[in-house]
Amino acid sequence: MDKHQATLNTLQDLHAELAALDNEMRKSGVPPHARAFRAWRDFCFQRSLALTFPPSIEDPRPDDLSLGALTAHIFSWFEQRYDKRSNIIFNPSIGVIDIDGDRFRMSVHMIQAGQVNVEINPARLAFRYRPIARAPRSVKDNLLRMLDGMTQQYADSIPVDLYPSIANQGALIMSVYNELTARLGNALVKEASADINGGVGALMDGVSLGHARWCFLQSAEKSIKALLQLDGVPSDKYFKAGHHLYKLVDLSPKLKNSRHLTSAVVDAVMCEAKVRYGEIQTSVSEALAAYQNSLVIIREALKWIPAKRRFGIVIYPGPFPEGQFDPVVDGIPC
């Protein structure tokens, strides 16, 4: 009998089969973050099972090997084997939120599909939102929970009148990263996503703000070049333009007519190569402005490149409106 068709009598039997699948995927070069879904798919195919996702039984007993419990057991095994730090789903995965001069690193979560509604609510900073929505509801989350190092005391101290600014920054970051991740098959977009991550790292650690600013210019530049490449603009034309964003924008009628690409936006991102070497000093405010405005340029360039977007998002500058949040349905009981 094929090893994958052996009878599953105990949870240990299932774990042994998952270990075999994991080993096969390792040999095939499947990265750790992709193995849970791949194993679940292969397990269903090999055993001709129609398991449901999300699991119909979320926290099954160890002795429960019913069809409703198998999905949860499979994903639990991979979660225990590979820590979340190895769960690097996509690049970029970080952003920067400015709160009245304080910079927070924002961890942009991977959302497989659908709609996510996000609130800004210190009262639910420690609340456990459900990672998978129960139909017909949408996934819920809290933007403050996405900010590394956010404490309850700090969250409580944020003036309510800053919530709209925080919401706008978060919405721009998540929407742009949605555009990037939907197009990672494009070589230039891959490079742009790596540049934006590198710039965010440099902006957050503050060691080389010039390097951060240069990374943001590169990310915007490569996003525009990805569009020009798609539109059939000869490569010698856009390579001749070099790092000059105005010249690159002029090569694209779509971008030239964009009301979002104002001179203020482009000027905030433009910089000389000398900033990389510290020959021209960059301030925190200049680096932050370059980051925020590079996101606008990236969004405007990539929206013209066909792709299947992963998710939609709505961020509320405050708690969810009355009737749109149920702590039982939208959360995980502790």
Image: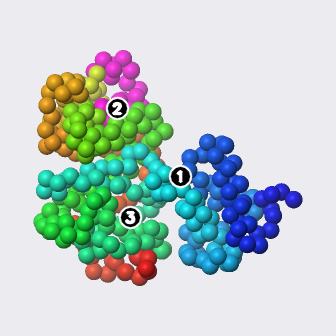
Quarter of the image containing the C terminus? bottom left
Q: Is residue 222 magenta?
A: yes
Q: Nearer the observer, disc 3 or disc 1? A: 1
Front-lying residue, 297 or 283? 283
Q: Nearer the observer, disc 1 or disc 2? A: 1
Q: Amino acid at mark 3?
A: Val
Front-lying residue, 267 or 262? 267
> Judging from the image, what secondary structure is the residue with disc 1 in?
helix
183 horizontally vs 97: left or right: right
Please name the residue shown 40% across and 34% down the image. Answer: 191
Residues in magenta?
A: 218-241
| Residue corresponding to mark 1 | 33
- Whole-percent x, y for residue 261 in the image: 21, 39
Q: Earlier in the sequence, mark 1 or mark 2?
A: 1
Question: Which image quarter: residue 223?
Answer: top left
Q: Is residue 250 visible?
A: no
Q: Please determine whether, in this image, residue 22 is positioned above or below residue 57.
A: above
Q: Are marks 1 and 2 in contact (CB under 8 Å)?
A: no
- Whole-percent x, y for residue 166 in the image: 21, 59
Q: Amino acid at mark 2?
A: Lys
Question: Rounded to the nearest whole Å, what is the CA distance between mark 1 and mark 2?
Answer: 27 Å
13 horizontally vs 151: left or right: right
Q: Earlier in the sequence, mark 3 or mark 1?
A: 1
Question: Which image quarter: residue 148?
Answer: bottom left
| Residue corresponding to mark 3 | 116
Dot 2: within a 10 Å radius of its alpha carbon, few (fewer than 14), some, or many (20 or more) residues? many
Q: Amino acid at mark 1?
A: His
- Whole-percent x, y for residue 215 in the image: 29, 34
Q: Please determine whether, in this image, residue 209 is positioned above or below residue 156.
A: above
> Judging from the image, what secondary structure is the residue with disc 3 in?
strand
